Image (cartoon, rainbow, N blue to C red):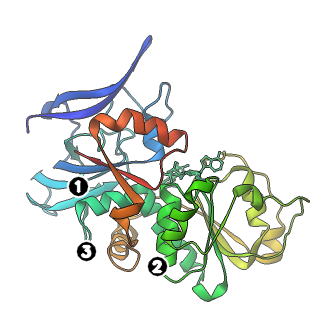
Amino acid sequence: MNRFRALVVNQTEDDFFLGVQELSLGQLPAGDVTIRVFYSSVNYKDGMASVPNSRIVRSYPFVPGIDLAGQVIHSDSPRFKEGDEVLITGYELGVSHYGGFSQVARVPAEWVVPIPKGLSMKEAMAIGTAGFTAALSVHRLEENHLTPDKGPVLVTGASGGVGSTAVAMLSRLGYDVTASSRKVEEHPYLRQLGAKAIIAPEALIPEKNRPLQSEKWAGVVDPVGGKYLPHILSAVKYGGSVALSGLTAGVDFATTVYPFILRGVNLLGIDSVYCPMEVRTRLWDRIANELKPNQLLESISGEISLDDLPDTLGKILRGEVRGRMIVSL
Ligand SMILES: NC(=O)c1ccc[n+]([C@@H]2O[C@H](COP(=O)([O-])OP(=O)(O)OC[C@H]3O[C@@H](n4cnc5c(N)ncnc54)[C@H](OP(=O)(O)O)[C@@H]3O)[C@@H](O)[C@H]2O)c1
């Protein structure tokens, strides 16, 4: 494996390159664990890392890919040995450290999670950062007292990666899920994942702008943010919570204090990247068991090769990827 293939992004003053190249082990960054990567996956952040003047990549040339699953081929850490099946999501992978769109990766041992029993390497990447973020959102909502008897739970951006996995996980746990999606053609898919009701995002915005609407949502998984968020907050039930993870509809929002001071609503920030290892490993165990979506490989995820990546990275930025896309290396 001294020579292997990887997706490389490079930008100079007057040129931009995105394509597959052959690399050698000597070109990989330092790290105590070397992994033969079998699968990676495509996330929105990878799309952002693969365009000119990206604010994600810190220096060029670079190998993106914020997720990977594979087998250890060399370890200087006593925690891992050759042949162990492992996964990584987040930390600096695919941001300032060569990432998972590569047949071989070398990483710090502190980032590495043993793949739990009940999950294959491929299933781990069908989940990936987006699915882990959905699981973390569910975990934080439950920590804030969400239970299935409290009422409907809203999932925004429902046909996307975080959204699809959140709909499937919440449905498996017995929640009454309302999916918000711009895509009418994905309604059958969302019903198949377990959504009881489906609405268009515009339906979240009332005709008359009021600081408080009638109480609808016991909890919300929101990877979309932007202009919808103030209206979502104003329709959360007393004591309910919004787990906010994303920005596909924008980074700014303006709200009033009323949902917080009159209804005790919680706005929970969700960060999967530096999620502490203790929570991370516990959540991956849950993902391998009661949170594991039914039909994870059959309908939530598709599979592409390294060579298909440039096209798929463009699609995820345009909101055209359904569910999760696994990259087979
Ligand atoms: N905080 C974290 O740790 C963390 C981790 C993972 C992801 N994220 C963030 O979460 C977001 C979603 O990631 P993802 O991987 O699920 O991406 P994705 O697969 O592209 O899904 C995003 C979904 O958002 C909806 N959407 C896109 N543009 C929109 C717009 N202008 N207005 C309303 N809805 C829009 C679309 O759903 P519909 O077409 O169904 O409406 C789209 O499928 C991204 O912002 C990503 O950076 C954060």
**Which one is closest to the eye, mark 3 or mark 2?**
2
Mark 1 neighbour density, 10 Å: few (under 14) some (14–19) many (20 or more) = some
Dot 2: few (<14), some (14–19), or many (≥20) neighbours within 10 Å? some
* Figure check: 247 above or below 30: below
Q: Residue beneath label 2, please?
A: 172
> In this rendering, which labeled residue sits more in front, label 1 or label 2?
2
Residue 279: which numbered mark, if any?
none
- Residue 109 disc label: 1
Q: State the separation of the CA atoms marked 3 and 2.
A: 16 Å
Q: Secondary structure at mark 3?
A: loop
Q: Secondary structure under badge 1?
A: helix
> How would you rate the neighbour count of disc 3 (Cα within 10 Å): few for under 14, some for 14-19, many for 20 or more?
few
Residue 187 versus residue 20 in the image, above or below: below
Ligand 1 within 8 Å, label 2 CB: no
Marks 3,1: beta carbons within 8 A: no
Residue linked to disc 3: 118
